Amino acid sequence: MSTSVADRRSRGLIWFTTSFVVLWIFIAAGPFIWTVWGSFKVQPDFFSKTDWRNALYGVMTTAQTGSAFTGDGYYGAWVEQAFWRNTINTGIVVFFTVVISLTLGTLGGYALARSGFRYAFWLLMAGLVFRAMPHITLVSGYLLPFFEWNVWGKLSTTIIVLVAINQPFTLWMLHSFFLNIPKDMDESAMVDGCTRFQAFRHVIIPVMWPGVITTGLFSFLLAYNDFAVTAVLLSSENQTMVPRINSFLGTVRETGDVMFAVAAVVSSMIPLFFLVLFFQRQIVSGLTAGAVKG
Amino acid sequence: MKHRTFFWFILPSLAAMFFFIALPIVSVAVQSLFVEHEQIMTEVENCGPFKCETVLQVDNEATAALREEAPLGRFNGLGTYTNRKHLAFEQVGVAWNETETFGEFMSELINLPFYKALFFTLTYTAVVTPFVIFLGLGVALAVNTLPRAVKGPTIFVSLLPMIVTPLIGALILFWMVDADGIIGATLQKIFNDPNLSLKASTPLTWMMLIVYGIWSSTPFSFIVFYAGLQTVPKETLEAAKIDGASRWQSIRYVVVPYMMPLVVFITLMQLMDNFRVFEPIISFSASAKATSLSWIIFNDLRGGDIQLFGSAGATSILTILGVAILLTPVLIRTWRDFNRKRA
Amino acid sequence: MTLMKSFAAGAVAALMATAAYAECEISSGNVNVLANDFPALKAITGTAAECASGGATISANHNKDFRNITVQALTPNPAEYTSVIVANSSIVPLLNEGLLRPLDDLVAKHGQGIPKNQLITIDGKIMAIAFMANAQHLFLRQDVLDQVGKSAPASWEEVVETAQAIKDAGIMDHPFAFLSMSDWNLGEEFVNMYLGHGGEFFKPGTAEPAINNEQGIATLNMLKELVALSNPDFLTYNTATVVPIWKSGDIAIAQLWGSSGGELLSGEGAEEGVAENTVLVGAPTVAGGSTPASSLWWDGFTIAKNISDEDAEATFLAMMHGTSEKMVTANNDAAVWLMESYVPGPAAAGVAATATAGAEPYPMLPYMGLLHQAVFEELPDFLQGNESAEKTLADIEAAYTAAAKEAGYL
C-alpha cells in the first residue's frame, strides 16, 4: 500500500542523503584533517614542492628528524615562541567580549523586541548600516584618538571595540529571539506590580538562555578569529593568537616559520572542539527558539 | 514599552555603537570630502650609507602652518568619489565616447580599479549567496534524517569550515590547490593537463575564490536552518503525509515556507558579508585577478607606505551604499512584517 | 664604496672597538621601540634591553605590520614610542609629517664613534642611524649552470639566455623566479629594473610621474620576458613562496632579498645538493647599462620628536648598545650589518657585490610610495598579456596622479 511506496522511496532517499552527508563531511573536514596530519611533519613535506605525497609518508621529516612524525612545530610555537601568552590574551579578550556583548545585547534586544514604535525598526536598520562598514576603515580611524588618549595596545580597548563592532549582529539575533518569547509572560508580571526591569529579571532571564548561548557562540567565534581589529590595536605583549600566528608567516624580506603557524592553528582549534561539542545542543535549541520567526 | 524604559534598556548598546561605529562613520564620511593640503616641498640633500643626492622633501613647518589653518585639509566636495580611483566619471565618459561596441566599453570600464573590483564583488555575491542558502538547507535536511547517534559528531564536523581562522584556513587551502599540492595535482591528473594551475588563470582563480566562499559560509546557514527544522511542527508534516504528499512535496510546501524568515535572516547576513569579501583575496594572493571593494580599501590603507584616508573613506561609504542597495528588497519585506506585527 | 670599505675594515675595527659602545647604564627614562618582526631586529632590541637599570624601562614592540601605525603612534605628545626602526621607505611618512627628532646633538655627545656611512642625513641634519643593508640580487645554482655550460649571468639579457638554455635542455620547466607577487613585491621588481635602465621616476624638481618613456617600455618588456621563464603562478610569488621552491631544487636562477642568503646557504630543509651549489652574486645590469638593476636598502633607528630630552637620550644610548659590537659579534650572520665590527660571511656576498657595483638606493622621496603602489596595481594587466606596455604605463601614471592629487603632491 501507500506505506510501502513511502518506504521504498525513503530507502532510496536514505541512500541519497547518507552519501550526500558523507560527501559534505569529507569536504568540510578534509582540509582540517589534512592540517592536523601535516602539523606533525616538517615544512618541506607538508608544503612539498616535489610531491604532495611526501606529506603522507614524511620523507623529509624522516630525513631531518629520524622519525616520520615530529612535534617540532608544536615545540617551536609553544616553547620557543611562548605561544601560551597569546593563548591567555585570547582567553581574556574572548571572555570579556562575549560577556559584555551579551549583557548589552540582551538588554537592547529585549527592548527592541518589546517596543512597538517605529524608531525600534529604524534602530535595527541603522544597526545593519553600521554592520556594513568595513572593519579596516573603522580600525584605521581609531588609531590616532587611541594613541592620544593613551589607550592603544591595551586588551580593554580591544575588548570594547570588539563588543561595539559585534553589537549589530548580537542585537539582530537576540531581538528575533525575544520576539518568540510570548509577550504575555512579562506583561502579566508587570500587571502583578513588577517594573519592566524586574519583569525582565525574574521572568525573561530564566527562559532566555538558549538564545543567549547561541548568540554567544557567534560572538565567541568573532572575537576568537578576529584579525582586522586585533592586529592593529594590540601591542606585541598583548597580542592574541590570530595576529601572532600571522607573524609566524614571515615578512616581505624574511621567510617565517610556517610550521609554527600550522601547529599553533591546530592547537588553537582544540578549545573550539570542546566548546562546540559542549554547547552543540544549546546552539540548536537556542536557535530553534530564536531566529525562526526572525 | 514606554519610551523612557526603552531608552534605558537600549542605552549601553546604543552608546557602544554610537561611539565606535556611528561617529567613525560620520568622520570617515566627512574626511572623504577633503583632500590633503598642498605639500610644500623644498630641495634638500639626503645622505645615506650608499650615496648623497639632492631630492625634494616636505617642508614640515610650512605644511604645519597650513594644517593649523584648516585641520581637515582642502575641501574637495565629491571630487574623491568621482576621481579615477572611484567612480571615475571622466574616464567612463571618455570610454563611452571613444569605444565603438559595448564589449569594448566594458573592457575599458573593467580597466578602472573601482569597476574591476565591483564586477568581481557582485559576481561573488550573486553566486555565493544562493549557493550557501541551498547547500546549507540541503545539508540541514540531510543531517536531520540521520540517526540520533551520529547527528552530534556530524554537526560538529559541519561547523569546522566556519570555526577555523579564515587567515590560516585559506592559507592551507591555497597550498592544497597549488600545482604541486594535493588538490592541484589531482585536478591535473583528472583533466590530464600537466600545466593546469588554479593560480595562473583568471577564471579558475575566480572559481577558487567562489568555492572557498561557499565552503566557509555554508556552516552558518546550515546551523541556522538545522535549528529551524527542529521547530517545524510534527503534526503539520504528519497531516501532509496523510494527505498523500510525497516527501519532496512536504518539503516544498510545508518546510520551506516555514523557513522563510530564516532565509531572510541568512540572505541579509550573507549579502552583507559577501559584498565585503576580502580575506580570501589576500590569503589566495589573488589581487592580480580579482579585487573587491574591501580589497581596495585595504590597499589604500595598508598597501604602501602612505595611507590614503580620504580615498579609503570614499570607498567605504560607497560600500555601505552598495550594501544598502542590495539589501533594499529584503528590508522592504522586513518593514512590512514589522508593520504587520504592530497591527 | 663606503659600504665595501666598511666590510673590509670590519676585521680591523673589531680589534679597536670604540669605548663609546661599552658604557650602557641607563638609570632613568623610558625606552619603547617599535620595529618590524624579524630576528635581526629582535637581536638589537634584545641587546638594548640589557641597559635597563634602576628606574629605566626598555621595551620593544615587534610587529610585521608596524608601518601601519607609525605615524599615528608618534603623533601625540608624548609619543607612544621613543624610537622606530625604519627602512628607507618606511622613514618617509615620518619625515613627511615631521615626527622625527634630529640626532645631531646626541651623536655629538654619545656617538662619536659612528662611522659616517651609518648616518642618514637630510638637509644636513642626522635623522636616523642605519645599521644594516639589504638588496635583491641573484641566487644561482652552479651545478645547473655547469650542465648547460654557462657562467654566472652579469646582465638580465644573459639571465634570459641562460634560463632559456636550461629550459631547452629540459632540466627545468620554469628555471627562473623572482618576487613577483602582485603586491608591494611586484612594485619593487619594477623599481629595480627601471633603475637598472637608468630611468628617472619623476620630472626633475616635481612630483610629476615620468615613467611613460622608452626606459619604461624596455623595463616592462624585460619583466615580461622574465615571467615567461618563471612559473605561471608568478603573481603569487613572494619570499615565503620562492625560498621553499629554491630549497626543493626546482629553480636555477632567482632574484631574492640578500636576507634570504643565510637560510639558503645553510641548507636546512633543502634537497641534497641544492645548498652546496647555491651561489650568491650581485644583481645583473640591463640594456647595456652599468648600474645593477636593483635598489639598495638600509634599516636604521630613529628617535621620535614628541618625547622628552631625557627619554631621547636614554633611547639613543640603549639603541647604541643594541647596535654595538657585542650584538654584532653574537649575531654576525643574522644580517648584513653596517657596523665596523661586522665580519662579512658568504651570505653577504651578493649584497656587497650589488652595492660595490654602484646600485642606486631606493628613492627616499615623499611620494615614491604612491608610485610604487600605482605600479603594482596596474602592472599585472600587462604581465598577463591583457594590454600593451604603453597602455599600462599610462594607467600607472593615471593611478599615481589620482593618488598624488589626493595626498597633496600635485
Image: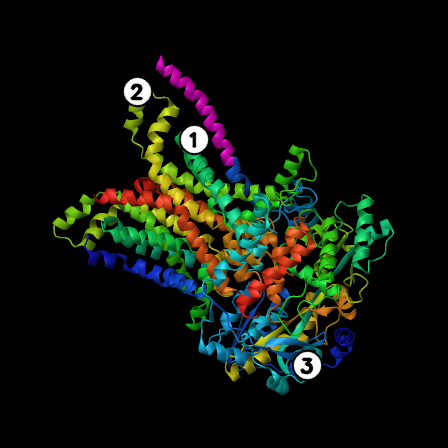
Q: Toward the viewer: B75 or C277?
A: B75
Please tell me how crowded label 2 is: few (under 14), some (14-19), or many (20+) other residues with Cα within 10 Å.
few
Q: Could you tell me which residue is drawn at 65 percent across and 60 percent down?
A: C187
Q: Position of residue A46 (x, y in %)?
A: 63, 46
Is residue A20 located in the magenta-colored stretch of the structure? yes
Neighbourhood count class around disc 1 (C-alpha, 10 Å): few under 14, some 14–19, many 20 upward: some
Q: Which residue is mark 1?
A: B142
Which chain contains the residue that carries disc 1? B
Helix, strand or loop at label 1? It is helix
Q: Is residue A127 magenta?
A: no
Considering the numbered disc 2 on the image, is that residue within a helix, a strand or a loop?
helix
C-alpha span from label 3 to label 1: 73 Å
**For the residue marked with disc 2, what is the amino acid?**
Ile
Mark 2 or mark 1, whichever is nearer to me: 2
Measured along the vertical axis of the image, is residue C134 above or below residue C116? above
Q: Nearer the viewer, residue C343 or B93?
A: B93
Locate the N terminus of chain C by quadrant.
bottom right
Of tags 2 and 3, the one toward the viewer is 2
The answer for which chain carries disc 3 is: C
Q: Chain of mark 2?
A: B
Please name the residue that numbered disc 3 is placed on. Answer: C114
Q: Which residue is mark 2?
A: B242
Distance, label 2 to label 3, CA atoms, is 93 Å
Residue bounds of the magenta highlight: A1-25
The amino acid sitting under disc 3 is: Ile
